[in-house]
Amino acid sequence: MLNSINLKEKHKIFSSPKSEVEHRTRHQSACSELNVFETQRTAFDFDLVFSNPVVVSMIQGKKVMHLAEKEPFEFVPGETIAMPAMEPMTIDFPEATKAVPTQCMALEICPDLISEVSLWLNENQMKLDGSEWSWTRHNHYLNNSPYLSATINSLFSTMIDADYSLRDFRAANITKELVAQLLKTKAKQFLLDNVQKLHVSNRLAHAIFYIQKNITSDLTIEELAERACLSRAQFFRAFKNELGMTPVQFINSERVNRAKRILRKPRTTLYETALYAGFKSQSYFNRVFKAVTGLTPVEWRRLEIGV
């Protein structure tokens, strides 16, 4: 999640309230503008729109977002929305108080910078199916990965540091990295959400579909590469470029997700869970599960179902 704003440092971040609803401060660089919002009372039907592509992330509290073509949804810390320019949003602040205000950031990004990053990716990390890396034309919602949170936190601290002589240079580089992460995350999510439709025409989707249908089998990179009609090296490179992880990491994450569903059944033993999820041994299952979730299977089960 994003770092909370230190109350002792708030004078560096927030100006005087611009309205009864919000404190809003802008921190500008050559390629972006960081808007930091704080709302100190409950409010509803607050309208907001940005003239450039924007990345919105929650810092503290909760909003209810009303966006086009989507049912209203809660927006909380650990979540981000990437939006195209001129996309209207209506916001409710159901829990904001002066003692515990709702805080969020909205990063407007220069379209030229997004085009520069897209061009670099299209020239240096071409997609296997030939489609181009591009900014979202629709609202793209995602849960922050640790890497994405770290990048946003780094950009936030850079943008509010007006005394740093290389501030604009560093802000531009971090913003480029953030844009690249978001482009890749969007493409990955689209691929995974549409495996059923794409597996007959997209080689990576075909390999993913095969993994998911045979998750308990002994899967090898050579077999998956052959099914994608690629060499082992080509398959490995394409998979990592487009999904942000190696094939083995993806297989393990799918097996851990399957194990979570099994662990919710309290009578299933850890050995049975490991076996049914596709792991060769309980000890290997324990290691992988903790590496992926940060918890052992026993700890995770206790938190989820209390046993």
Image: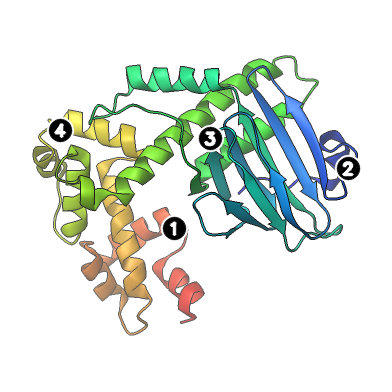
Of the residues under marks 3 and 2, which one precedes in the sequence? 2
Q: Which residue is mark 3?
A: 84
Q: Quadrant of residue 113?
A: top right
Dot 3 falls on a residue whose secondary structure is loop
Of the residues under marks 3 and 1, which one precedes in the sequence? 3
- Rendered location of residue 272, percent (x, y): 25, 75
Badge 4 amino acid: Arg
Q: Which residue is mark 2?
A: 17
Of the residues under marks 1 and 4, which one precedes in the sequence? 4
Q: CA distance from mark 1 to mark 2?
A: 41 Å
- Rendered location of residue 52, percent (x, y): 60, 28
Seen at 37% across and 38% down, the residue is: 187
Badge 2 amino acid: Pro
**How many numbered marks does the figure carry?**
4
Dot 4 falls on a residue whose secondary structure is helix
Q: Residues within 10 Å of mark 4 (few under 14, many from 20)?
A: some
Cβ atoms under marks 2 and 4 closer than 8 Å: no
In the rendered view, does 169 fall on the left or right side of 291? right
- Mark 2 vs mark 4, foreground winner is 2
Badge 1 amino acid: Thr
Q: CA distance from mark 3 to mark 2?
A: 27 Å
Q: Which residue is mark 4?
A: 232
Of the residues under marks 2 and 4, which one precedes in the sequence? 2
Q: Quadrant of residue 19?
A: top right
Dot 2 falls on a residue whose secondary structure is loop
Seen at 64% across and 38% down, the residue is: 153
